[in-house]
Image (cartoon, rainbow, N blue to C red):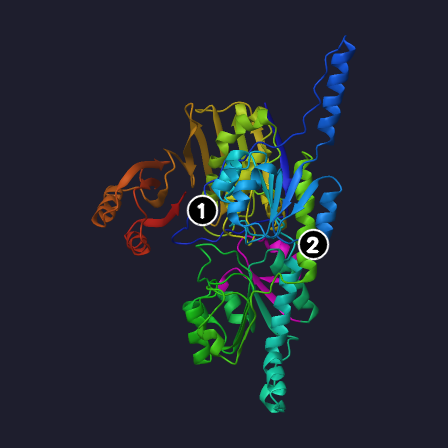
Amino acid sequence: MSASKSRSAGKSVKAAKTAKKVKTAKAAKPAKAVKAKKPAKIAKVTKKATASKATKKSASAKTTKPRVLVKEKIAQSGIDLLKKEFSVDVRLDMDQAQLKKEIKNYNAIIIRSSTRMTKEIIEAADQLKVIGRAGIGVDNVDVKAATKKGVIVANAPQSNIVAAAEHTIGLLLAQSRNIPQANASLKAGKWERSSFGGVELADKVLGVIGFGRIGVLVAQRARGLKMKVVAYDPYVSAARFAELGVEGADKIDDLYKQADFITVHLPKSPETLGFVDEAAFRKMKKGVRIINCARGGIVKEEALVKALKSGKVAGAAIDVFVKEPPVGNPLLDFDSVIATPHLGASTIEAQDRAGTIIAEQVAAALNNQFVSNAVNIAPVSPEEMNVVSPFLPLCEQLGRLITEIADGPLESFDITYQGALADYNTKLLTVAFFKGALEGRVEDTVNYVNAEGIAEERGIQVTESKKRQAVDFTNVITVVSSDKRGKLTVGGTTIGPKHRPRFVKIYRHDIDIEPGQYMAFFRYDDVPGMIGRVGTLLGSRGINIANMNVGRKKREGKAVMSVTLDKPIPTEVLKEIKAEPGFDDITFITFA
């Protein structure tokens, strides 16, 4: 007996393929969703005195309001919203020591970026239900500790997207017409009209690297200026690009060759640090102009300095730096560089919006309602969570695995849940798959709450199927897609009372191996000596193979070897193995 349903969020997702993969965060077990408790039934009381006492106690409990600590400044509208229902203390002068001492008295806290919600402070918060971050990043919150304690962590991820997009356009215009330089010259008593000739934006090509929410807003505004927009994001479908009137670049080099201006809107991760480097600048048009309002370090600062000196880059507008404030940064020495002190989110509206949004999130948490911006929980009943939670890390790994091993774009995913899992709501498992496939590849922090929405924005099409019967295993999760070489499959299960994960399918072959922190997958001709060559090459570099499994469909055909290792394989070793006769492909992945 089987049941299937289609969960479509557009038409396709493209998976970028890299020689060496980066480390992703291990999926933390989401805290149980907070559900409103039904009032307990009160037993019938026969003695009037006892009934009266119970009634007074009940009335007293109803009048006790949850307490909210506003630790950093937010919009007054947000404070007013909270005061309608809760007791609010605004304590902007409280230091970390005082916070640790007094946090036990509060049910909620609202912070920005200065306050550090450490493990010690969270552990001291006996009554805390929610931490509200009035902004995007939660780097200053120990989310793992909060999750373990059952504290919701919520942020305001869309509060500054308009501000960031508009600041990008402002820097684009300022750079094209030399506005800051001309302003400074005029105020210095000079009249140098001929020195500040600019260029028009109409009919120029704007390259947008990273096509998330901010990238989309920038593209829309640039098209209003009659610019041609070319965007690169391997996790956005061709249909989504076409819908927005934007040309999607299959390769980043295609964008570099065309763009007169390039703006970066990538998330900061090990994979994106130094994304625009020396090699990238060499591929760009001479006279290109660069804008970075995303994160410091995505445009490699040393490489940009060299490109400015050589004339390859005509100018740059930078809002973010590796080290802030950027004291002594050589980029500030160039007249052709416009620099602002991390102002992307610094608008009255963005700050007000962040305060109001986080107040709404905190109110929802305290009222036991769904918290849409929670970064560490998902709305699943405790009963279902007990069943599906052991499979969450596996689904994340499968999402990561299939996007990493794919040769070219993946147009759709078919996920099949077989076995006892088919009797339960598997929505959270599909969300976990989205999280694994998207984490570290989009500008937002991907979590169990927003992963599905991000997937929808990027045009991912997923079909879920359920089958009560499973062959060989009690439960099996299989994901099928198609890449340039044809059908692509990954699958997994869990083993034993501790639900240890196992990969049981890879590429187009059956395997059986427990995932490890460092894994490599080899596709090669099934002829004698291939396994030995891999072992010899790795051993000569001091890389020990912990576990190995080989799968094949027929003799002397193609085979796949999966290995777990004690340490990473350097890029040069991967290249050396791939250069050996008979090897089709090698993918190295680091799982946390």
Residue 554, position in %: x, y? 35, 36
**Does residue 324 appear anywhere in the picture?**
yes
Work out which residue is located at the far top of the displayed protein and give it: 46
Residues drawn in magenta: 227-252
Res 24 label: 1
Residue 472, position in %: x, y? 43, 24
Residue 428, position in %: x, y? 57, 35
Where is 215 relative to 425, above or below?
below
Residue at image coords 42%, 48%: 23
Left or right, 566 with respect to 434, comes to left
Where is 29 relative to 270, above or below?
above
Residue at image coords 73%, 27%: 60
Q: Secondary structure at mark 1?
A: loop
Where is 464 relative to 78, above or below?
above
Q: Which residue is mark 2?
A: 75
Find out whether the residues at labels 1 and 2 contact each other: C-beta distance under 8 Å: no
Left or right, 587 with respect to 326, comes to left
Residue placed most toward the observer, 43 or 506: 43
Where is 142 relative to 369, above or below?
below
Let me know if residue 507 is in the magenta part: no
Image quadrant where residue 412 sits:
top right
Let me know if residue 235 is in the magenta part: yes
Mark 1 vs mark 2, CA separation in Å: 35 Å
Residue placed most toward the observer, 233 or 5: 233
Q: Quadrant of the C terminus?
A: top left
